Image (tube, rainbow, N blue to C red):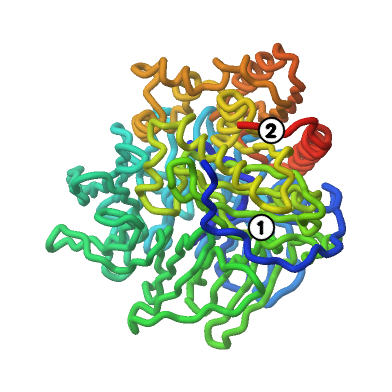
Amino acid sequence: MTVWNASCRALALVTLLPLAAVALPAPTAPPRPSKQYTIEQFMGTTGLAGMDFTADQKHLLYSSNQTGIFNIFRVPVGGGAPAQLTHSTTDSTFLVSAFPRDERLLFQRDQGGNEQVHLYVRTPDGKERDLTPGSKLRASFLGWSRDDSAFYALTNERDARFMDLYRYDAKTYARTQLFQNDAGYDVAGVAPDEKSLALLKPRTTSDSDLWRYDLATRALKLLTPHQGDAQFSVADFDPLSGALYVLTNVDSEFTRVMRYVDATGTLEEVEKTDWDIVSSTFSRSGAYRITVINEDGRATVRLHDVKKGTELPLPTLPEGDVVAVQFSRDEQRLSLLHNGDRSPTNLYAYVLATKKATRLTNTLSPTVDPEDLVEAQRVRFKSFDGVEIPNILYKPHQASPDNKVPALVWVHGGPGGQTRKGYAAFMQYLANHGYVVLGINNRGSSGYGKSFFRADDQKHGREPLRDCVEARKYLASLPYVDATRVGIIGGSYGGYMTLAALAFHPDAFNVGVDIFGVANWLRTLKNMPPYWESRRQALYQEMGDPTTQEQMLRDISPLFHAEQIRKPLLVIQGANDPRVLRVESDEMVQAVRKNNVPVEYVVFPDEGHGFKKKKNELEAYSRTLGFLEQYLKQPASAAVTN
């Protein structure tokens, strides 16, 4: 399946001037009356994740949180009422794959957000079986064998640092180890003939290599020798020829599709654009290839007829983007996930012969009028040193020069994430209540070329943070923003940037909201989850090595500079977070409270690094709005200065 994740729910750490405005928001119509919605009404909207056709290709499976947490549902491809298949009331359940020959399905689930994900099978009678039992282990699904007789899974049960590869018999679940991972590779794919593996070896967050591992001889071969920094990842294997398709930005600013040629040991170009290609996958027979492009913060999809060498049209759907596409096994149908700024993700089934698309879900809360939501705008400004910074802007309907409103700089996760167009419930909720939201893609963000992506390496807390301060200046230049009421908010790495802004630029923002944010880089980098071992050194080169660069990391960690924070702060934390440990937020809150500054602290006992339960999202959003209404929306006593 090819997926573009446009949600801001998952706040991940890793996948972590005089103002010269070059792009102002497009002219808009005069302010219109807009109904204001409660958080309960917003939470009436349903989230979707994943999709797969059943073996008989008459139904589509998907995960939905309509029950309050994610469970798996089945819906007829021609439309109709969905049926709930799993009934978890404690931990979210996410679809992995349908079995190709019968009604069983694979799913994954962790415990309270601890990221110790296990792989399960569900049989048609509703029984569930853990295929990766044990404690303190993590498992993931890698795909099906070419003949559907087996599937592949990775687990770190042998060594918490490394993911080993197993082949599971589809009938008996008996398993055989195919690859013992002792050197920190990421297993990226199994060749269709099951004779070799594709392995990824990261060196930095901007540089990596692909290797081929021969399962018979256990020989390793480097496939991607290169000079300078270049990222490589597996796109897919051609089901017919077995050729390895690769995504890479070698000798290019942007990622393109290339094919490895065994005869010459070289890569040949298959497809490129002026933006990053984020995925390219084949249908079952190899007759079609699907490409997803990150085009200036939005998704575009290309559907290729491989034999004819032509591009096929996708159905015309309502305003928004197709963000994921999957072929049925007989290649007669497509399943589509579609989403827009004012429309949450919905599932469609599309018949190629008739060119008919059927909408199978309706996820927007029936109490919310999409006309009351806002269409996000892509805008840019020049930062302190002339670097152009792209952003996604949400302007409330009620904002105008005669009704200036407060504003927020939203900083995404990462390092290296991106704020994109698409439905973002939290941003829409804030805009609906009269807050301008600017989703900044500061230097170091993905999607704008590898030079921009590398521009924050070993510069965290400095240049990328100054981009956020310049974003406040950009907001102040907008005629409908009250320049004396601007805050900063973010999750994970964005939470770090929030804390850093309040500590290192204490007069730049009126308030800060930190969601699962890093306060102490020394602790975070030393206590990374063990299964991040393959990327440990890469992250050290990005952020700093805690064993050799302790002082630098102290200098950029807000915890050690908390005495400088003078503005109200809200901190939100998951008790089971394995990436940003709760102790970081505990210590940060305690330190800031010593300054006699208003600090609110919310801890969710059943969440990890991000939200998986509606009830917690509801409380977090509600608490955030209440905090902003008290400390930001009230007229400021004096203008903010930098």
Q: Nearer the viewer, residue 196 or 337?
A: 337
* Quadrant where the image shows the C terminus: top right
Q: Vertical placement of 125 versus 242: above or below?
A: above
Residue 86 appears in the figure: no
Residue 434 appears in the figure: yes
Return the x and y of residue 123 as percentages of the image width and height: 62, 54
> Which quadrant of the figure has residue 208?
top left
User: Mark 1, residues whose alpha carbon is within 10 Å: few (<14), some, or many (≥20)?
Assistant: many
Q: Vertical placement of 364 versus 303: above or below?
A: above
Residue furthest to the front in view is 18
Of callouts 2 and 1, the N-terminal one:
1
Side (left or right) of 7 relative to 246 = right
Q: Amino acid at mark 2?
A: Val
Q: Secondary structure at mark 1?
A: loop
Residue furthest to the bottom in view is 354
User: How many discs appear?
Assistant: 2
Residue furthest to the top in view is 594
Side (left or right) of 576 relative to 544 = right
Q: Residue at x 59, y 59 (%)?
A: 24
Residue that numbered label 2 is attached to: 640
